[in-house]
Image (cartoon, rainbow, N blue to C red):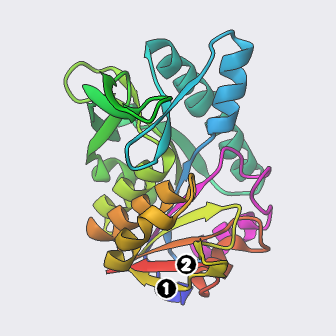
């Protein structure tokens, strides 16, 4: 199946070694040998929280009326988020790839205007009593544009882009947290990728104690209220990617041997139009 893949956008956690099977390196080499254009988008929320707390900046998490939990990003948190994501984590991944003979370059969405976003002015969240309240939007954003030309230039130089989920505000140039899963879906959609792959710590989407092998986007949307915290974000991003032009999204385990090849072979949850 992987022979026909021209473009693949893969979301991994905050480390390419811890939390992802090291054999992902072999997968990346194999895909590149087949001519696949590969983009890695990484997360690292746990590491951001850990370092922020060490710096004395307590992290706040909010829940939307739909039950989606996310980090509340004020200006100081946005700066720590950028420091950790686009600094240490991104460079560690590039370091690992270079050490294995894979030419890579780390980019935040700020670099070259890769990801521009609109800052959310207000957020509707659920308070401790279960009431809906509106709060100031902070420094989180909704991606509005992806610089596809920049990614194409890197492909022409045989470079694997490693993208951290920090975008730049389209008017005031603020740093914005845009979430790794959503960065993956928007890049994938803009590139009209064959596959957007979300690697996680489970086999895929589990409903009624069973792995869901395949779903249409309409079925996935209808099932969102049944999906637990964390996985719901991935399913939403997977749906978005397909709706924006990706041929199919896959949610699969990053812990398995050869996680990318396994996912492409059908081990996981495939979401398509």
Q: Is residue 97 left or right of residue 250?
A: right
Q: Residue furthest top?
A: 56
Q: Residues within 10 Å of mark 1 (few under 14, many from 20)?
A: some
Query: Residue 204, located in which quarter of the rendered image?
Result: bottom right
Q: What's the distance in space between the residues labelled 2 and 1, CA to CA?
A: 5 Å
Secondary structure category for the residue under label 1: strand
Q: Earlier in the sequence, mark 2 or mark 1?
A: 1
Q: Residue at x 44, y 36 (%)?
A: 130
* Mark 2 burial class by Cα count in 10 Å: few <14, some 14-19, many 20+: many
* Horizontal side of residue 97 vs 113, given as left or right: right
Q: Left or right: where does residue 138 sit relative to residue 179?
A: left
Placement of 258 over or under 161, stated as above or below:
below
Question: Which residue, as the protein is rendered here, is positioned at the far front?
Answer: 129
**Which quadrant would the C terminus be assigned to in this image?**
bottom left
Number of on-image labels: 2
Q: Position of residue 244 (x, y in %)?
A: 27, 65
Which percent across, then down, holds residue 186?
34, 54
- Residue 269's disc is 2
**Which image quarter: residue 75?**
top left
Report if residue 93 lies within the magenta region.
no
Residue at the location (58% across, 33% down)? 85
Q: Which residue is mark 1?
A: 214
- In percent of the image, x 30 and y 43: which residue is there? 143
Is mark 2 in CB contact (under 8 Å) with mark 1?
Answer: yes
Q: Position of residue 22 (x, y in %)?
A: 80, 61
Against 106, residue 35 (above or below) is below
Mark identifier at residue 166: none
* Pick the front one: 97 or 86: 86
Q: Which residues are magenta?
A: 8-32
Q: Quadrant of residue 136?
A: top left
Q: Is residue 26 magenta?
A: yes
């Amino acid at each position: 199946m992987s022979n026909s893949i021209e473009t693949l956008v893969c979301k991994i956690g905050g480390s390419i070694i811890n939390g992802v099977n090291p054999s992902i390196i072999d997968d990346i080499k194999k895909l590149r040998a087949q001519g696949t254009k590969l983009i890695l988008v990484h997360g690292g929320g746990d590491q951001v929280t850990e370092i922020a707390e060490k710096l004395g900046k307590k992290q706040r998490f909010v829940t939307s009326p739909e039950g989606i939990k996310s980090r509340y990003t004020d200006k100081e948190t946005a700066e720590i988020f950028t420091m950790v994501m686009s600094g240490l984590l991104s460079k560690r991944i590039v370091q690992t790839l270079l050490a294995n003979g894979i030419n890579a370059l780390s980019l935040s969405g700020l670099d070259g205007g890769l990801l521009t976003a609109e800052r959310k002015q207000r957020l509707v969240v659920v308070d401790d009593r279960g009431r809906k309240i509106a709060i100031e939007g902070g420094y989180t954003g909704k991606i509005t544009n992806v610089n596809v030309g920049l990614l194409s230039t890197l492909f022409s130089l045989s470079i694997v882009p490693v993208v951290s989920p920090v975008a730049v505000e389209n008017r005031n140039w603020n740093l914005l947290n845009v979430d790794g899963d959503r960065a993956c879906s928007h890049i994938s959609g803009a590139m009209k990728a064959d596959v957007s792959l979300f690697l996680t710590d489970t086999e895929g989407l589990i409903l009624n104690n069973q792995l869901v092998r395949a779903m249409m986007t309409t079925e996935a949307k209808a099932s969102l209220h049944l999906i637990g915290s964390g996985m719901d974000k991935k399913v939403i991003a997977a749906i978005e990617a397909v709706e924006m032009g990706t041929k199919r999204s896959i949610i699969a385990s990053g812990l398995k041997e050869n996680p990318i090849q396994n996912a492409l072979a059908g081990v996981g949850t495939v979401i398509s139009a």
